[in-house]
Image (cartoon, rainbow, N blue to C red):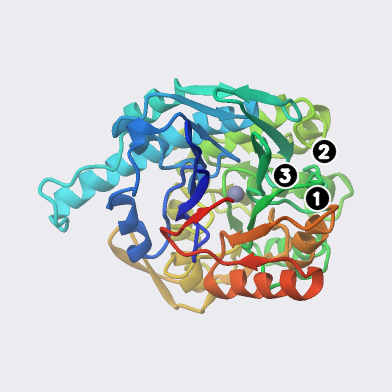
Amino acid sequence: MTSLSFFGGTGTVTGSRFLVETGQSKLLVDCGLFQGYKQLRLKNRQPLGFDPAGLDMVILTHAHLDHSGYLPALVKQGFRNSVLCTQLTKELCEILLPDAGRIQEADAEHANREGYSRHHPAQPLYTEHDARRAIRQFKTCGFGEAQDLPNGLSVKFLRAGHILGASIVQLDLGDRRIVFSGDLGRYNSPLMHPPEPVRSADYLVVESTYGNSVHPEGDPEDLLEDVIRRTVQRGGTVIVPSFAVGRAQSLLYHLNRLSKSGRIPVVPIYLDSPMAIDASDLFCRQDGGARLSKEEARAACSVAQYIRDADLSASIIADPQPKIVLSASGMASGGRVLNYLKRYAPDPYSTILFAGYQAGGTRGAHMLAGADQIKIHGSWHKVRAEVLTLHTLSAHADANEIMRWLSGFEAPPRKTFVVHGEPDASDTLRHRIQEELGWDCEVPEQGQRVELA
Ligand SMILES: [Zn+2]
């Protein structure tokens, strides 16, 4: 009996965990952290629904924490076998997972200090040490190479675009093939490859992050140019809260083009985030992992001065000269960007430019909704700066791009499962797939188990 169970990534874009069971094998595809609203985050503390020690392998589509961030907790609970992914996914996990462990430790410490945890003492979900231990279980596989697994199974990673190392996972179980789309990238990204077409699958698990929307048209460089020009003209600073992986590199690419063509004034550009610097370094080392060559990546990254040192960061914050600063986190939920917001959010001459989706409940969402003050590190700060968002840099396929990828199948899968979306996004995509392609399609529920006949 072969079955597929959905233990996360249903009704939400986070916590992707899909369990494939055959008579002899148990494989988990993705092992993500639930993120965002509190009721989602609490799921990270609930029983998994399967025994981690009984898993033969974890296969990762890509390194984003909503796909990989629960792995150290899985290892902590007894998972001792291999984690299989592409080389660049492994290298990104080496940057992201220990950092996630450090944040978990800091949060637990903070909860104990403030006394607000229901658990006494509060325990981190996992530590930096747990994360490093999990990374020792990683094994890698190249794109397009069929990798044999025990019990007659085999797996192949195809390019998904999206971020470095991101893959579509094709799992062959004897005479049945299950394909997991992972997170699909864009067709026209200057940085990343487009998602590779898949010709056939018996069962398909497809993401639907933007299943109900189409990205706005427009050149991000036009908006960046306008915002930077007017902010610098009035003597202000542009602060860009940016996701460390993917978004920061994409911003550097566009800033470098604007700078080289003289479209923006000459002011210092800083990348002030150790994690974004590590991710940029990886981008400059990759060979063929992106559409941009490593030489082009190096040229793009050279537009900014890298700031690792915290004292240097403090002196840049204090310097009143106009400048452009990219710093994490992307939703201003933590990280060094908070120090910049304390100084520049109250400054009416400066601009806070958000560079992507702001999840509900985050500081970024509050600021974009027009909040006139924000709380940072326990104190309130006025928001007088210009606040706006750059919508056009998404690393995710929109609804039309997902449909374009699906049109690459030569025959309909026996069944298609729509996952990794808010309820409306998943259901809208399900409806489109049924109407436009005529495929048998459903949106599975959390905990649902499906027999694959
Ligand atoms: Zn992703």
Please tell me how many numbered marks the rendered image carries. 3
Tell me where residue 421 sits by quadrant.
Answer: bottom right
Secondary structure, mark 2, is: loop
Tell me where residue 166 sits by quadrant.
Answer: top right
Please tell me whether mark 2 or mark 3 is closer to you in this view. 3
**Amino acid type of the residue that numbered disc 2 sits on in the rendered structure:** Arg
Residue positioned most to the right? 261
Mark drawn on residue 291: 2
Q: Position of residue 293 (x, y in %)?
A: 82, 31
**Amino acid type of the residue that numbered disc 3 sits on in the rendered structure:** Ala
Taking depth in this image into account, of 12 and 236 the one nearest to the observer is: 12
The CA span between labels 2 and 3 is 12 Å
Q: Are marks 1 and 3 in contact (CB under 8 Å)?
A: no
Secondary structure, mark 3, is: loop
Tell me where residue 192 sits by quadrant.
Answer: top right
Q: Position of residue 436 (x, y in %)?
A: 80, 73
Q: Is residue 355 visible?
A: no
Marked residue nearer the N-terminal end (2 or 1): 1
Taking depth in this image into account, of 165 and 320 the one nearest to the observer is: 165
Marked residue nearer the N-terminal end (1 or 3): 3
Any atom of ligand 1 within 8 Å of the CB at mark 1? no
Left or right: residue 122 versus residue 245 is left
Mark 1 — residue? 189
Mark drawn on residue 160: 3
Any atom of ligand 1 within 8 Å of the CB at mark 3? no
Q: Residue at x 55, y 25 (%)?
A: 151
